[in-house]
Image (cartoon, grey):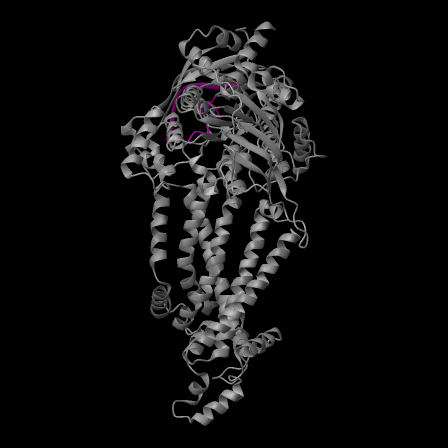
Amino acid sequence: MSAVKPVLSVKDLSLKIRGNLILDGVSFELEKRKITGLVGESGSGKSLTALSIMQLLPNGAATNGSIAFDGTQVLTASEEAMCDLRGDDIGMVFQEPMTALNPLKQIGEQVAEGIRIHAGVGHEEAEKRAIAILSRVGLPPEKYPLSRYPHELSGGQRQRVVIAMACAMKPKLLIADEPTTALDVIVQAKILDLLKELVSENDMALLLISHDLGVVAGLADDIVIMRQGKVMEAGPAIQVLQRQAHPYTAQLAKASTHIPKQTNIWKAPELSQPLVEVSNLICEYPGNRTSLFKRPTPFKAVDRVSWQMDKAEILGLVGESGCGKSTMARSLLGLIKPADGTIAFEGKVIGSPDGIARADIVQFVQTVFQDPYGSFNPRHVAERLVAEPLFTRTDLSKSDKRELVQEALNDVGLTSADGDKYPHEFSGGQRQRLAIARAIVNRPKLIIADEPVSALDVSIRAQILDLIIELREKLSVAWLFISHDLSVVQAICDNVMIMKDGNILESGNTKAVYAEAKNPYTRALIKAAPDLSNAIRLRSKS
Amino acid sequence: MSWFIAKRLVSLFVTLIFATIVIFAVLEIIPGDPARLMLGINATEDAVSALREQMGLNQPIFIRYLDWVTGLLSGDLGKSFTYSSQVSELIGERIWVSLPLALLALTLSTVIAIPIGLYAAARRGRTSDTSIMAATQFGIAIPNFWFALLLVYVFAVALRWVPAGGFPGWENGIWPALYSLFLPAIALALPQAAILSRVARSALIEVLGEDFIRTARAKGLTKSQTLWHHALRNAMIPVVTIMGLQFAFLLAGTIIIENVFYLPGLGRLVFQAITQHDLPVVQGTVLLLVATVVVINFLIDLLYAWIDPRLRSTTR
C-alpha cells in the first residue's frame, strides 16, 4: 500500500494561537478514494486541524511542521495560491447547515459562484454546471429551482447545497467537519451515503471529522483519534476500534456504548394511579394568514395524543426535529395551553377547578435543557441559579432554602463550595449537573429532560446518564427523556414512544420496541441510527 | 411581495390617521388664545370674540378636527394667523430648502460613513481602525450647531470660500443653491456619519464572524471578494435601520441649522410659528414632517424586503 502517493500528508503539525499550544505534533496521511475519520472530543483540535489544512485559521495563529497537498506546501503557500486551492482542489463541508449558507443569496448563485471563480467560465456555463452538481446531490432543479433561498430548504437539503458547493469542482480532497451532527438520524444516514458515493465517483480523499465513533465506524477506512491536540492512535478503522489497544480509544469506545448500572430494574407498579396521564392532547400554533378575511388554519403540532407514565419511570420520547416532541414537553410544563385534551398529574387535571393550577405545575415538574450554558443567567452564582424553583415558596425560610440547595448540589456530585461560582467557571459536564441540581431542588415528581446529553462529549454523557439513573433510584423521580439519539434512549429508558408529525406511532417497552418494531418508520429510524458495536460487527464480517 | 407591500401600506395609513389626531389634540390642549395673540393685549373682549367666531375657534373640537382633515385631503392646510396667506403656500416655498438639505445631508453621511465603516471593519483592531473609531467619538460628541458655527467661521469668515448664510433660491440656478446648502448639510451630516460609520463597522464585524463567510472563503473567494459579495449586503440591514431613524433626526436638526445659516426653510418657519402661536402653520408643518418620516419608514421597510428574502416570504 505504501506505493500509493498520499493526497495529503500532515507531518508534525503544531499550532499556537496567541501563545497557547493547540496542536502538538499531529501527523497523518490521506489517500485517494479513502475515507479517514478524525475523531476526538471537544477541545481535541480536530476542527483546527481541518482549518490548518484550509489555512483559514483565526487571527494570531502560528503553525509549524508541514502540510503537503498534491505537491503544494500549504503552510508556506501564498494567500493567492491558497485561494486557488480552496474550493477547487480542496472542498469543505461544515457542521451547521442552517448558518453555512448566505441567507440573502439564491442557492444556484451560491453554487455557481465557486465554479465561476475556479473554472473561469461565464454565468451561463457556471449555471449549467451548478445544475449538474445540484442534481447529483439530490436537488434536481425541477423540484428545487436554483432561485430558492436557503431558508426555503430543510436542514438536510441545505447540507446537500453545501456539499454541492464543496464538490462542484471535483476536488481531490473533501473535508467534512461534523457534517451530520445537526441533522436527524434518517437524514444523517442519507447524507453519509451521499458522501461515500461522491468519494468513489470523484476519486476523492475524504477527511470526516466527527465526535461520534458510531458514524466513523460505519464509514471510515482509516481512523485518527485525537485528544488535547495530539494524535493518540491512528490506523485502519475497524482494526483500531476492534482491538482498542490504546487506553484512550478503549475509553472513548466504552463511553459511547455506556449503559448505566441499575441496582434494581424498574417495574411498572400494579394497580396504581399513573403519575402522568395525557389524554387526547392537541396543541396548535397559528398558521400563516393567506387571506384578509379567512381565519388562518392552525398548525397541529401535537395531534390528539394519549399516553401515560408511572412513578420513577424513565420514558423516552424519540422523533425527528419538528415532530412535536418539544411542544408536548412545553404543554406538560404549562407553558402552552392545549387546544384540546387534558393532562393530569396523579389524577389531578391541569387547569381544572379541582385540579392543579397552571402556576403550581413547577412544584410537580421541572426541566433540564440541551444547552446547559444558555439556560443560565451568566450574572448569577450557582447557588442562586439552583434556588430559582424555590423563589415562589413562601412556606420555606431562607435557611431551609439554603439547605435544600446544598443538598441538591451534593446530590448531583457538586460541592457546597461550587455554590459561589458563576456558570462560566464550570465545565460543560458540571454545568449540566448544575442544571439537574436546579431541576431537583424542590423535589419534583417528574423531570422533563429535552436532549440533555446531546451537546456533551461521550465521556461526560456517560456520567450524566449514570446521574439520571442514580437520582431516579435515590429520589424516585420520573424522567421524560426527549432525544433524537436512539442509542442513548436504549441505554437508559424503561419505555419509549416514537413520535412523528404530531402523532405517537409506536410505544412500549424499550427492549421490545428496539427488537421488533411494528411500525416501518420506527424500523427505519433504528436502522439509520449509527451504532458502534453494530458497525464493527457488520464491517469486520465483510 | 405584493402582500408585504399591501400590509405596509395599510399600516402607513393607520399611522398617518393616528398622527393627525395626536397633532390636532396636542395643539388644542396647549394654552394660549390665538385670537388674543393676533390682536395684541390691548384688544377689547368683543373684538377678540368676533375674531374667534370668524376663525371658527368657537366650533366644537370634533367639528374642527373634521374640517381640518377634510381640508387636508384637498390640500388645504388652512390659513396662517400671522401671515394671512395659505399655509400650503408657506410650506410649499420652504420645503424646497429643507427637503434638499436633509437629503443632501443624508447622502453625505452615507457616502462618508459606509466606506469608513468598511475600512475600519476590514482592518479591525489595527491602529487605523482604533484611530478612526476615536475620531467618530468626537463626531458624536460635538453638537451640530456648534460645529455649524465653527464651519461658518473657518470656511465663510476666514477662508471666504462659501457664503456665511442665506439662500439664493433655485430660480438662480442649481449650483449657487446647492453651494449655499453645502455647509449646513455638512454640519448636519458629520455627527450622523460618525454614528452610522460605527454601526456599519460593528454590523460588518458581526457578519464577518458568521459561518457563511467561512463557507465563502472555503469556496476560494478572496478576503475582499467575501467582503463585497457576501458580507456587505448582510450588514446593510442594521445600517438601513439607522439611516431611517437618522432621516427623522436630520429633519428635526434642520430647525437649528436653518437658524444658524439663515435659510428660509421649514425649520425657521415652524420655529417662528411656534413663538407666534400660529396654529395652522405649526399643525401643517408638523404634519408634513410626521408624514415624511412615516413615508421614509415605509420606504425603509420596502428596502428591508428587497435586501432580505426571508422577510418577503414569511409575510406573504
Q: Nearer the viewer, residue A267 or B197?
A: A267
Q: Is residue A5 visible?
A: no
Q: Is residue A242 visible?
A: yes
A221, above or below A438, in the image: above
Find the residue positioned furthest to the right: A142
Residue at x 39% of width, y 41% of height: B124
B120, above or below A229, in the image: below
Question: Quadrant of the rendered structure where residue B262 is?
Answer: bottom left
Q: Nearer the viewer, residue A471 or B259?
A: A471
- Position of residue A239 measured from the top left corner of the image (x, y, whole percent): 51, 7
The span shown in magenta is A52-74
Residue at x 59% of width, y 5% of height: A541
Report the label total.
Answer: 0
Question: Quadrant of the rendered structure where residue B30 is?
Answer: bottom left
Q: Is A200 one of the magenta-colored residues?
A: no
Q: Which of A470 and B170 is in front in this view?
A: A470
State which quarter of the image contains the C terminus of chain A.
top right
A223, above or below A456, in the image: above
- Position of residue A65 measured from the top left corner of the image (x, y, whole percent): 40, 18
- Position of residue A80 measured from the top left corner of the image (x, y, whole percent): 49, 31
State which quarter of the image contains the N terminus of chain A.
top right
Q: Is residue A383 left or right of residue A273?
A: left
Q: In this view, does B146 lie to the left or right of A216?
A: left
Q: Is residue B310 left or right of residue B119?
A: right
